[in-house]
Amino acid sequence: MKYALVIFETDESRRRIQADRAAYRKEYEAWIGSIAAAGKLVGGEALETENITPATVRRTADGTSAVTDGPAHAGEETLGGWFIIDVADREEAVELATSLPTPETVEIRPILESA
């Protein structure tokens, strides 16, 4: 079964990145490498979170679009990217997510598989 591991940067993860980007990246890439080596990584992408402000588009009740600068949900956590994994079940997806050695928040979402 496929799951998305949706990664949210936190204030703590941003502090660690700024303190030592190379060490942080090495730790993070080792985690990703272990998932790939186990044959469970399908893909993923990182989002630009430091230099370019995101834009949010919301459709209003009258059918018009409202565009604002900034994330859809403001707060401490920032959407940083995602990985798609192929695992036996939800428990295995949770196990992989809990093995992330860096202080991001990981949301685990099943991928809807069409008929």
Image (spheres, grey):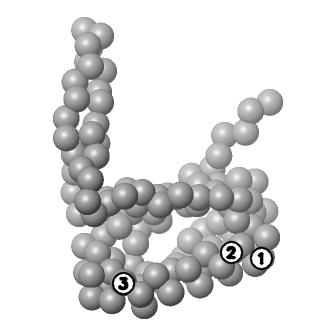
Q: Which residue is mark 3?
A: 21
- The residue type indicated by label 1 comes to Ala
For disc 1, the marked residue is: 38
Displayed quadrant of residue 13: bottom left
- Which is more toward the observer, 17 or 103? 17
Q: How many marks?
A: 3
- What residue does disc 2 label? 35
**Measured from the top left, where is residue 97 in percent x and y?**
56, 71
Q: Is residue 89 above or below residue 55?
A: below
Q: Disc 2 to disc 1, how far (Cα)?
A: 5 Å
Report if the CB atoms under discs 2 and 1 are less than 8 Å apart: yes
State which quadrant residue 24 falls in: bottom left
Residue furthest to the top in view is: 62
Is residue 46 visible in the rendered image? The answer is: yes
Kindly report the distance in space between the C-alpha atoms of the residues bearing marks 1 and 3: 26 Å
The image shows residue 23, relative to residue 54, as above or below, that is: below
